[in-house]
Amino acid sequence: MTTDFKFLTVARDGRVATVTIDNPPVNLITTALLAELDDLSVMLKQDSDLTVVVMRSADPDFFLSHFDVSAILERSTAGIAQRDAQIKPMHSLCERFRTMNKIVIGQIEGRIGGGGSELAANFDMRFGVRGKTCINQMEVPLGIMPGGTGTQRLPRLIGHGRAMELILSGDDMDAETAERWGYLNRIFAPEAITPYVTNLARRIASFPPTAVRVAKESVNNSEKPWLEGLLEEAYLFEGLLRTEAAQHNMQRFLEIGGQTREGENRMNELCAALGLSNIS
């Protein structure tokens, strides 16, 4: 895996890659950082040995800020606006993270806003820090609007009314509200977030990779019509059932105490043990 980035550092530990964003002073999404994020997403998507990606920041006060406003001001406004035949590059970047067959986790310890928030909204999970993580969609006060999936992704993530409040107010959403609304999965004390996210990433990566990837695909299918999603779920389940890893792990589950009173009461431990016995 390449590490030839200026604003990103990629560290690999087995099936887990940790990406650290570092573009002082506030991790602004400049055109250069956007290009690196795009290259990164392509690289991660193509890595067949990777299962989990953790996105974090070198600056605990800023995860990822909005897009460079000075760069937006340089865009041509001649003529009338035209409908695009294809989605924008930022849309493609967000969609690549959303649909790649890796589990993408955002470790959001500080402020996130604008395009940074739009990108993170396309991750599979987001975790924050109590009293510190802060989300802001600042586009409407500037006279524009979120244009990097925000008006489409945020309503699906937190609901219509709450997305409207976040997008239209230009006000900060604190970590506690973000957790309650579903933007953040959980919030932690500053010293607790890294151990939790690290352990979660390793735990997921210990399970059969095909099961992890197909489960993500099926969850994403929940945005399809209900019956279509159910048919896809059944098809994907049948495919997994036929894998060697599934047959091995189900048999192992029974051997280590599954379906016994004692074993069922410590399912968390049984699942961890199955990760350790995974044959990939």
Image (cartoon, rainbow, N blue to C red):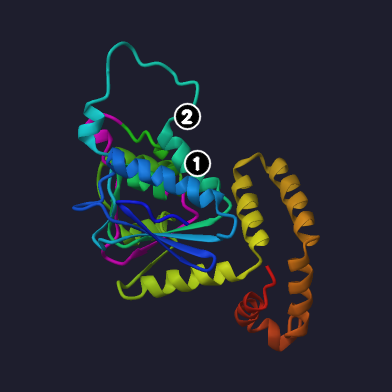
Image disc number at residue 205: none
Image coords of residue 228 (percent x, y): 71, 41
Secondary structure of residue under mark 2: loop
| Among the 4 quarters of the image, the one containing residue 35 | top left
State which region is magenta.
121-144
* Outermost bottom residue: 262
User: As shown in the figure, which amino acid type bears the numbered disc 2?
Assistant: Ile
Q: Position of residue 274 (x, y in %)?
A: 66, 77
- State whether residue 162 appears in this view: no
Label at residue 95: 1
Amino acid type of the residue that numbered disc 1 sits on in the rendered structure: Glu
Classed neighbour count for the residue bearing mark 1: other residues with Cα under 10 Å, few (<14), some (14–19), many (≥20): some
Where does residue 171 sit, x and y in percent of width and height?
25, 46
Tag 2 residue? 87
Q: Are marks 2 and 1 in contact (CB under 8 Å)?
A: yes
In which quadrant will I find the C terminus?
Answer: bottom right
Ranked by sequence position, the earlier of labels 2 and 1 is 2
- The answer to whether 198 is drawn above or below residue 239 in the figure is below
Mark 2 crowdedness (10 Å alpha carbons): few <14, some 14-19, many ≥20: few
Q: What is the spatial separation of the Cα atoms under label 2 and label 1, in whole angstroms? A: 10 Å
